[in-house]
């Protein structure tokens, strides 16, 4: 049985964890290293640190946070936001990251993904797709959902796979932070088109939302934020309820 990974998604602005709705209205809710340590101790499988505004301000400010996190958490860590150069990736991996998630720069130059994969390997490169529903399709957005690309999000995920990305992380703008469930149709559409692992993000309000997603798509991992940040449920609760519903999970 395929075991679904549970990932703690931690969005960061400067040195604070932030959360909003639909990737807007970000409010400070905690400290990144305190939260990542807590989730590690509760049994999370992986952690994703995302600089919420990096691409807008031409920066990458997660290295210090990453270095501290690796002293206290011993699960794979991904960082994303502001990854624009090969040096950015090298710096992230040297500081302890296992993977980097790339969105904006991939849209601007898909060869960047190809070059990164050639140097660091596909296992280190996640293609990040941030999507908003537009009538009967989904459009990919960049710059933390601020700018349209006019690219079909599902087709774009396929292009990222072809370029060599080892995973796809899909974030639903419409569902982010609303705690009303994932965009199951979006995740299903992408998992049916790509053969690499897919991480679903955006919308978890309860373990039932996670269970519904896992039962109706072929996702390989689920990223949760508000659900655990606000103490609605903890990692153990989610995993135990998944197990009770015959969903493979790492306990």
Image: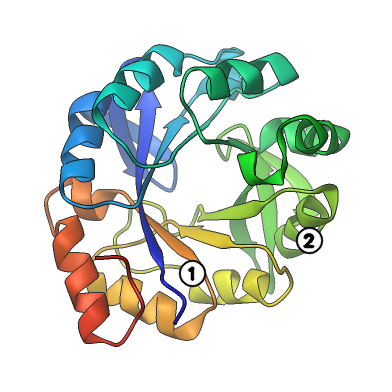
In the foreground, 205 or 114: 114
Mark 2 to mark 1 CA distance (whole Å): 18 Å
The answer to whether the residues at label 2 and label 1 have Cβ atoms under 8 Å apart is: no
In the foreground, 151 or 69: 69
Q: Quadrant of the C terminus?
A: bottom left
| Residue 183 disc label | 1
Q: Quadrant of the N terminus?
A: bottom left
> Residue 212, position in %: x, y?
37, 81
- In this rendering, would 158 be left or right of 245? right
- In this rendering, would 117 be left or right of 217? right
| Residue 8 disc label | none
Mark 2 is surrounded, within 10 Å at the Cα level, by few (under 14), some (14 to 19) or many (20 or more) other residues, namely some
Q: Residue at x 57, y 40 (%)?
A: 145
| Residue 158 disc label | 2
> Residue 50, position in %: x, y?
46, 33
Front label number (2 vs 1): 2
* Colour option used: rainbow
């Amino acid at each position: 049985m395929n075991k679904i990974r549970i990932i703690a998604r931690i969005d960061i602005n400067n040195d604070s964890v932030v959360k909003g709705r639909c990737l807007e209205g970000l409010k400070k809710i905690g400290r990144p290293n305190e939260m990542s340590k807590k989730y590690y101790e509760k049994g999370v499988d992986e952690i994703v640190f995302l600089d919420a505004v990096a691409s807008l301000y031409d920066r990458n400010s997660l290295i210090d946070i990453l270095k501290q996190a690796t002293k206290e958490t011993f699960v794979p860590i991904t960082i994303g936001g502001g990854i624009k150069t090969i040096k950015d990736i090298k710096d992230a991996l040297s500081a302890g990251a296992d993977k980097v998630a790339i969105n904006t720069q991939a849209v601007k130059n898909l060869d960047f993904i190809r070059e990164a994969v050639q140097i660091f390997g596909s296992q280190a490169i996640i293609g990040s797709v941030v999507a908003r529903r537009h009538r009967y399709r989904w459009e990919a957005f960049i710059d933390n959902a601020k700018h349209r690309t006019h690219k079909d999000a599902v087709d774009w995920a396929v292009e990222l796979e072809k370029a060599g990305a080892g995973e796809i992380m899909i974030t639903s703008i419409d569902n982010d932070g609303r705690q009303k469930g994932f965009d199951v149709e979006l995740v299903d559409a992408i998992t049916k088109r790509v053969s690499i692992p897919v991480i679903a993000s955006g919308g978890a309000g309860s373990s039932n939302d996670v269970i519904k997603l896992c039962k109706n798509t072929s996702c390989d991992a689920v990223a949760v934020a508000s659900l655990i940040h606000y103490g609605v449920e903890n990692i153990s609760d989610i995993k135990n309820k998944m197990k009770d519903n015959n969903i493979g999970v790492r306990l």
